[in-house]
Image: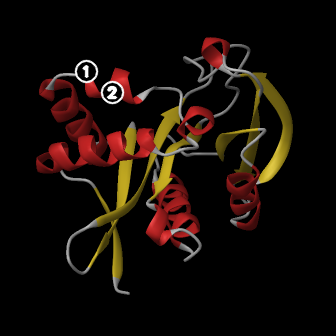
Amino acid sequence: MSIIIRRVRQEDWARVREIRLDALRDPVAAIAFLETHEQAAARPDEFWQGRATGAAEGSAVAQFVAEDADGRWLGTVSVLIEHPGGPAALEGDVIEVEQAHIVAVYVRPEARGTGLAPDLVRAARDWAWSLTDPRIERVRLFVHEDNARAEAMYVKAGFEHTGVALPVPGGVPGREIELAVLRS
């Protein structure tokens, strides 16, 4: 299967919306995402247009997709740049260095187990390492403690447990476990 991983483009906004809604319909969405399908589906087109534009340009956020030879999107990942003292992802989280935060990792069921998820994560990590202003010192992500399959994939992709565990927002049971990789 011929797959390319590329950054989204501004004109991809409807497809950005489609894959996000598909991800939120996934049976593990409740522990993998901090948004519901209903919340995302209610957002206007302008929201998705802005999201695609922001993820396609600049150095604050990027979204990558895995696209097969027929143009079908098989997976996606986003990465956010975080600055010391800036807004944190979860309550109790503290940002101490210039870092990237990988979020919204999703691979369609038919492409799972093919190595696509680690490839997407590597694309996000490599983009973060390529930035010069700011120079990223670490790349991190959070995984729900009950999402063992995703956690194993992140460890296999080179991420290590940091010892940080924070409550899931919104009253969802469990904890979010931080994994990170440091710039070598």
Q: Are marks 1 and 2 in contact (CB under 8 Å)?
A: yes
| Mark 2 secondary-structure assignment | helix
Q: Is residue 35 above or below residue 58?
A: above
Q: Is residue 36 above or below residue 115?
A: above
Residue 22 at x, y percent in the picture: 36, 46
Q: Residue at x 39, y 30 (%)?
A: 37
Residue 164 seen by the camera: yes
Q: Is residue 44 above or below residue 31?
A: above
Residue 139 at x, y percent in the picture: 63, 47
Amino acid found under the numbered disc labelled 1: Ala
- Of 83 and 171, which appears nearest the observer? 171
Which quadrant of the view contains residue 90?
Answer: top right
Amino acid found under the numbered disc labelled 2: Ala
Q: Residue at x 74, y 67 (%)?
A: 156
| Mark 1 secondary-structure assignment | loop
Location of mark 1 (residue): 42
Quadrant of the image for the C terminus? Answer: bottom right
Location of mark 2 (residue): 40
Quadrant of the image for the N terminus? Answer: bottom left
Q: Residue at x 58, y 45 (%)?
A: 136
Q: Residue at x 57, y 33 (%)?
A: 30
